[in-house]
């Protein structure tokens, strides 16, 4: 018999596969259509009878990744208006007290959804965790700053989904007092924002930040420039009322036109320093310092103690930025002569090149670009958050994912199917024959952290050891490459 539970809005019927109950496409807020597209998330509309929840729900309108990255990550979308929904996997809807994990997907705040196959939560449920994967508004729908619209609607959606978990997770056997929020890339940046926001207090007890940082946030003035450009592309005033009148596909086309303009503008600084530097040339619409949810950079807020008492597990892959340079051909195009100009787009002074090159005598200009930007955008900011968190007296654990896909390296997002134990669903990302032993190990560590707050290795303090996930063996290692970190800090300070 298929499982039925009662949640906010009414009863839902899930499906049972191999002893795991899955409830898919469950709305946690009303459909953000028409003028509601640019409002705060509104309460879910109730339904009569039993609603079917056996198939994936709708996803926010979005375009594909650039072709070379699309071939690796893929785009998984489902049409429909009710895309503010969650998927829930549980071992026992009739149980109680199970640890809960809430997943926030990545995708540069422009792409992604809870329909991605490697985000299937069945393995977590198999191992005693209630797994919730949420959708939120992306791109202009979620983050464009327009008159008459609250900023950071995508973050407001995440908060609404976490509040839904608090209200409803007991119906799935979960413990609302033991909730771990975790996310990767834009999802990891979202986790940092939630750790910084007073509005998130009490909605979760632990946090995992994968391949994120605490600095991706635009000033309100710079975000208004971008909102104005969006409205210009639509030929409309920069107001929520005007932009809400256009079809989602038209809004998406304007959003993509603005992103393309930023990428090819000979004077990109006119888009605002925070949009250019924080977006790293990959993101356009993303969280904003709105004075309400976010009053300062998340990293600064965390350092000041905003997340005191919330244990943190954080880390990144060893070669994050190779996803954006190797398959796209950028790595081959960046010569040593061009490298300083490429680094300047990320606000990195060329003085750092000599130090990285000395440690990598055989590296090409493209190799060095990937190594330096990986550290600047991911590794160093992640380490700084972990250090600040630990200094505030809260447990912090640091890791690095070092297993390399043979043709691309330890690229951005590569660790996700290992964490979810969904290697069979992710061959386009992992390549052939990824090591199941490593998936067993990482998956177990994430569950241990969500269950007890301890992933199985010592807490991190400034300069101390990091768990290095690799195959054939993982091990605690000294804090990686402190000399390069110091050189990079100096180059960023110029």
Image (spheres, rainbow, N blue to C red):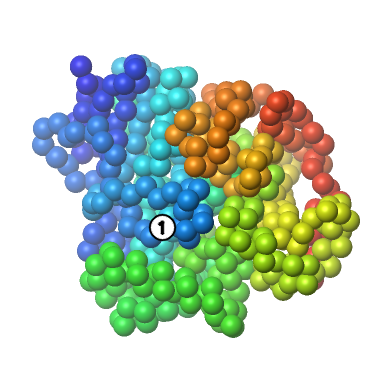
Quadrant assignment, res 330: bottom right
Quadrant assignment, res 389: top right
Q: Position of residue 142 (x, y in %)?
A: 39, 60
Can you see residue 191?
A: no
249 relative to 98 in the view: left or right: left
- The quadrant of the image that shows the N terminus is top left
41 relative to 310 in the view: left or right: left
Q: Which of 491 and 217 is in front in this view?
A: 491
Q: Nearer the viewer, residue 364 or 282?
A: 364
Q: Where is residue 49 in the image (x, y as percent from the top left)?
A: 11, 32
The residue furthest right is: 358
- The quadrant of the image that shows the C terminus is bottom right
Mark 1: which secondary structure? loop
Residue at x 69% of width, y 38% of height: 402
Residue at x 28% of width, y 43% of height: 57
Residue at x 24% of width, y 22% of height: 3
155 relative to 412 in the view: left or right: left
**123 versus 360 height, above or below:** above
139 relative to 329 in the view: left or right: left
Q: Where is residue 294 in the image (x, y as percent from the top left)?
A: 52, 59
Crowd rating for badge 1 (residues with CA inside 10 Å; few <14, some 14–19, many 20+) = some
Q: Name the residue under label 1.
A: 64
């Amino acid at each position: 018999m298929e499982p039925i539970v009662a949640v906010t809005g009414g009863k839902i019927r899930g499906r049972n596969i191999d002893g795991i109950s899955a409830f898919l496409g469950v709305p946690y807020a009303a459909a953000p259509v028409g003028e509601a597209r640019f409002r705060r998330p509104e309460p879910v509309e109730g339904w009569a009878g039993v609603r079917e929840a056996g198939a994936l729900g709708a996803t926010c309108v979005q375009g594909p990744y650039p072709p070379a990255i699309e071939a690796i990550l893929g785009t998984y979308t489902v049409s429909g208006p009710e895309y503010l929904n969650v998927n829930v996997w549980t071992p026992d809807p009739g149980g109680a007290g199970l640890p809960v994990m809430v997943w926030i997907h990545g995708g540069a705040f422009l792409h992604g959804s809870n329909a991605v196959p490697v985000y299937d939560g069945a393995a977590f449920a198999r191992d005693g965790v209630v797994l919730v994967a949420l959708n939120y508004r992306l791109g202009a729908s979620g983050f464009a700053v327009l008159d008459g619209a609250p900023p950071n609607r995508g973050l407001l959606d995440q908060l609404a989904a976490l509040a839904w978990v608090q209200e409803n997770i007991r119906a799935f056997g979960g413990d609302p007092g033991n909730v771990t929020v975790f996310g990767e890339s834009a999802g990891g940046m979202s986790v940092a924002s939630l750790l910084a926001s007073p509005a998130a207090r009490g909605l979760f007890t632990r946090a995992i930040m994968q391949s994120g940082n605490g600095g991706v946030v635009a000033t309100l003035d710079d975000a208004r420039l971008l909102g104005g450009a969006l409205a210009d592309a639509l030929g409309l005033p920069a107001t929520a009322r005007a932009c809400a009148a256009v079809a989602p596909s038209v809004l998406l086309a304007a959003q993509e036109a603005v992103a393309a303009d930023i990428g090819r503008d000979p004077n990109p600084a006119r888009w605002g320093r925070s949009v250019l530097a924080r977006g790293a040339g990959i993101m356009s619409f993303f969280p904003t310092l709105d004075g309400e949810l976010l009053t300062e950079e998340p990293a600064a807020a965390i350092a000041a103690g905003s997340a005191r008492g919330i244990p943190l597990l954080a880390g990144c892959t060893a070669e994050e930025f190779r996803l954006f340079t190797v398959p796209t051909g950028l790595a081959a195009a960046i010569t040593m002569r061009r490298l300083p100009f490429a680094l300047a787009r990320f606000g990195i002074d060329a003085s750092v090149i000599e130090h990285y090159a000395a440690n990598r005598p055989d590296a090409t200009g493209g190799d060095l670009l990937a190594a330096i930007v990986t550290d600047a955008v991911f590794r160093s900011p992640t380490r700084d958050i972990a250090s600040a968190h630990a200094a505030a007296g809260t447990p912090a654990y640091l890791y690095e994912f070092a297993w390399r896909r043979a043709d691309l390296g330890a690229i951005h997002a590569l660790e996700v199917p290992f964490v979810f134990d969904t290697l069979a669903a992710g061959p386009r990302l992992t390549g052939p024959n990824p090591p199941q032993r490593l998936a067993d190990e990482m998956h177990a560590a994430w569950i241990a952290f969500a269950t007890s707050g301890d992933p199985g290795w010592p807490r991190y303090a400034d300069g101390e050891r990091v768990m290095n996930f690799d195959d054939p063996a993982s091990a605690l290692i000294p804090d990686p490459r402190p000399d390069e970190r110091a050189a990079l800090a100096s180059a960023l300070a110029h």
